[in-house]
Image (cartoon, coloured by chain):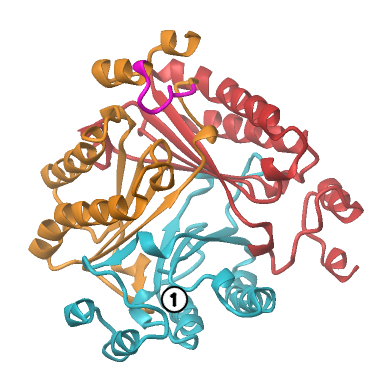
Chain colours: A red, B orange, C cyan
Amino acid sequence: MPLWNIWHSPNTLNDKEKELIASQITAMYTSAGLPAFYVNVFFHPLPPSDLYIGGKPRSNFLRAMVQHIALRFEDRKDPVELQKRFLSATDRILAPICKKYGLDWEYHILETPRELWKINGLVPPPFGSSEEKEWFTTNKTSRKSEKL
Amino acid sequence: MPLWNIWHSPNTLNDKEKELIASQITAMYTSAGLPAFYVNVFFHPLPPSDLYIGGKPRSNFLRAMVQHIALRFEDRKDPVELQKRFLSATDRILAPICKKYGLDWEYHILETPRELWKINGLVPPPFGSSEEKEWFTTNKTSRKSEKL
Amino acid sequence: MPLWNIWHSPNTLNDKEKELIASQITAMYTSAGLPAFYVNVFFHPLPPSDLYIGGKPRSNFLRAMVQHIALRFEDRKDPVELQKRFLSATDRILAPICKKYGLDWEYHILETPRELWKINGLVPPPFGSSEEKEWFTTNKTSRKSEKL
């Protein structure tokens, strides 16, 4: 969590740009206090013969499907304002690279239950807890955390 | 939105057939008033060594995961009747091609929040609005729309 | 249903191990009475240049996204206890193979509406029904079932 699946036309993002996007996405979540390693960003190149928009093959498209688990808007104060800022931040990451390659881009977010989520066999510690802060600092799971 | 991810056994759908399926799927949504370019259909070939049904590798399967955002059944009048008709229309598209190749097919739909969805950095106009009609006619996003 | 999408670093699971995982996952559901063929397990190898954790490319990661349709925790007695046992059973399947290859692993589950799900053009019979028992025994859909 969060899990970003990004389908994109091939030959549009190079490895350096993918890593940059992934690190910018990660920064959105670490600034909210989430451990960096929670952030999964997966890229999937799709040739025009497998990518259809409006029924037509396309060679210049980027589509992200974002899943939020640990930190859901509905659990926060001011969810509407927070959503708006999050979507704007997402566009600030995607727009430059999409404009460079002439891609249209689209994304949507879904929010799934935190209680149905585990990492390395562990239930992640509660948001804002001292155990989570430890995971944030060490940037990895800690079995000790679960035993607390 | 809508986003169709279709995993299928390789060497079962050719490019022409994929485009036909994508255009038939698109027509289901444009007939409800949605702009054609809202409809994303992605195909993902999966070899038997990556596709297991009931624990066994399969070479003749098609699985669609459909995500609805802009137009959710629950927001419409008569959602139950509408769902039934939509599922039947989906089967009328998938059944002929699946029978041609001897594929079993399965699909499910999930519905996600409209307020967590953007295209080209824009919040899409409300369903049924005059701005949406403009997007339908031009078949592309319009920055003007957002400023209204 | 259920649909398991598993993204994993390439050269970490061989075909035999994938089939073993798929059959162990299937057994979790057949023991609850679901037909084996309901269980879809798809593997997707992702090279480090397409798989970023915390903004860094990774070559030793496994991520599962699980979708439950036919049998949702919320529809069962004791959903919390059931969830806990299910997550533990999942880890018992994934941990040995992930430890063998030095993979970190993560998964989450989402639950989607049963009424938006069909197989081979058929509405699957209700959970626990005699028709479902027939599908379980024959391990395939039966058009007769729908006509009942």
Residue shown at 31% from the left, 36% from the top:
B39
Residue extending farthest front: B77
| Residue B127 belongs to magenta span | yes
Above or below, C143 against B22 in this view is below
Magenta-colored stretch includes residue B94? no
**Quarter of the view holding residue B16:** top left
Q: Quadrant of the N terminus of chain C?
A: bottom left
- Our reading of the magenta stretch's main secondary structure is loop
Q: Quadrant of the C terminus of chain C?
A: bottom left
What residue lies at 52% left-to-right and 57% top-to-bottom? Answer: C9
Task: Quadrant for residue B103, please give it.
Answer: bottom left
Q: Is residue B24 left or right of residue B56?
A: left
Dot 1 falls on a residue whose secondary structure is: helix
Between residues A90 and A83, which one lies in front from this camera angle? Answer: A83
Q: What residue is disc 1 on?
A: C22
A114 lies left or right of C59? right
Answer with left or right where residue C61 lies relative to residue B22: right
Horizontal and vertical percent for residue C104?
Answer: 65, 61
Nearer to us in this view, B25 or B127: B127
Q: In the displayed structure, does residue B141 sit left or right of residue B58?
A: right
Q: Residue at x 46, y 76 (%)?
A: C17
User: Compared with residue A120, is residue A40 higher up or lower down, i.e. above or below?
Assistant: above
Q: Amino acid at mark 1?
A: Ala
Image x and y of residue C136, in percent: 33, 87
- Residue range (magenta): B123-130
